[in-house]
Image (cartoon, grey):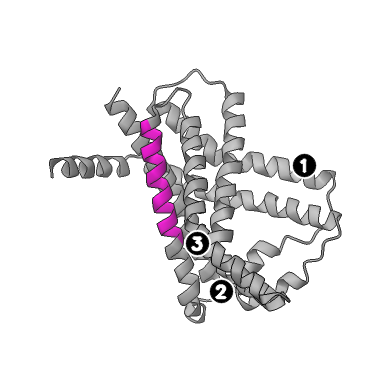
């Protein structure tokens, strides 16, 4: 009971720290911003290879139309050219400011001040790619995975094969998500400060973040499965708002996990 009391006291202390009020929102904002150059690049590459996206529109029978439009409105473009590359690089550099702020905060917590700006910026860009990649993975697999297989079953000639793959997907979805998220998050936590962290602290923090991310994402997916009629009351913007709330939740838990790891390291140093 005493250990539980100490843990709760420590958790409340972490949550009340100033950076917990600033960093999650900043990280979430720049994560959303990073979607713009990524979608522009995907659209340019698709156009370059003359790929058609007309058939993909049929998936709107299963997806919330507002979320689908958000992710497909930038798919059409003029192809891959110098302007697209410059736009992608410059916008992604701007989007990396979120992880850059987390790196600076982590160095402040651990009292590490000998890392140069270029190293921190390169690290921030790499972390942004990983963080956004995890975001896309959760969105594609956990949130929209079922919708994708419903769409696939409608256009596929081999229904049995789609059913078999869907069954495998349901069995492997959670274990695959746990493994992929855990190792990537643990790597991100190790990268944050300019010092060697104990393996135990990053393990605990990564496990915490992974489990809470998966639970939160499952709740977010339930919203679209059972509460999509909220559009009737709140308008089409409600799905966009829920997307932003979910991204903020992911960012908040990520920063909280970093703080837990730092607290463990400092207490046991």
What residue appears at the point 52 percent right and 58 percent down from the top-left corner?
A: 172
Secondary structure beneath dot 3 equals helix
Where residue 131 sits, quadrant-wise, is top right
- Say which element carries label 2: loop
Q: Which residues are magenta?
A: 200-217
In the figure, 101 relative to 240: above or below? above
**Left or right for 159, reference 260:** right
- Label 2: how many Cα within 10 Å (few below 14, some 14–19, many 20+): some
State yes or no: residue 39 in magenta.
no
The residue singled out by tag 3 in the image is 171
Q: Is residue 212 magenta?
A: yes
Identify which residue, 215 or 39, lies in the foreground.
Answer: 215
Q: Is residue 103 left or right of residue 110?
A: right
Which secondary structure lies at badge 1? Answer: helix
The x, y position of residue 133, in whole percent, is: 59, 48
Disc 1 crowd rating (10 Å Cα; few below 14, some 14-19, many 20+) is few
Rendered residue at 85%/55% (across/down) = 49
Label 1 vs label 3, nearer the camera: 3
Residue mark closest to the camera, 3 vs 2: 3
> Residue 100: x, y in percent?
54, 35
Instruction: Give the side of residue 252 with respect to residue 48, left or right.
Output: left
Front-most of residues 163 and 191:
163
Instruction: State the predominant SS element of the stretch in magenta.
Output: helix
Q: At x 42% / y 41%, what residue is drawn?
A: 206
User: The N terminus appears in which quarter of the rendering?
Assistant: top left
Label 2, on which residue?
Answer: 236
Residue 19 visible within the image: no
Tell me residue 178's x, y (percent): 47, 50
């Amino acid at each position: 009971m005493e250990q539980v009391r100490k843990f709760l006291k420590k958790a409340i202390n972490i949550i009340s720290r100033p950076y917990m009020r600033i960093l999650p929102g900043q990280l979430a904002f720049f994560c959303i911003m990073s979607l713009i150059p990524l979608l522009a690049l995907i659209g340019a590459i698709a156009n370059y290879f003359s790929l058609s996206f007309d058939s993909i529109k049929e998936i709107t029978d299963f997806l919330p139309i507002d979320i689908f439009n958000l992710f497909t409105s930038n798919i059409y473009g003029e192809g891959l050219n110098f302007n697209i590359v410059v736009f992608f690089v410059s916008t992604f550099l701007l989007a990396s400011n979120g992880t850059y702020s987390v790196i600076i905060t982590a160095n402040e917590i651990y009292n590490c001040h000998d890392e140069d700006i270029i190293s921190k910026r390169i690290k921030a860009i790499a972390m942004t790619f990983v963080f956004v990649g995890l975001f896309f993975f959760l969105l594609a697999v956990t949130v929209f995975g079922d919708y994708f297989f419903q769409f696939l079953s409608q256009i596929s000639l081999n229904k049995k094969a789609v059913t078999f793959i869907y069954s495998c997907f349901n069995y492997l979805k959670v274990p695959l998500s746990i493994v992929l998220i855990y190792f990537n998050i643990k790597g991100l936590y190790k990268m944050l400060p300019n010092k060697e962290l104990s393996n135990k602290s990053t393990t605990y923090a990564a496990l915490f973040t992974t489990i809470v991310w998966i639970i939160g994402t499952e709740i977010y997916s339930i919203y679209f499965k059972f509460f999509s009629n909220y559009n009737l009351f709140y308008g089409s913007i409600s799905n966009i708002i829920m997307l932003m709330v979910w991204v903020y939740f992911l960012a908040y838990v990520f920063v909280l996990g970093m703080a837990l790891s730092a607290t463990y390291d400092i207490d046991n140093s």
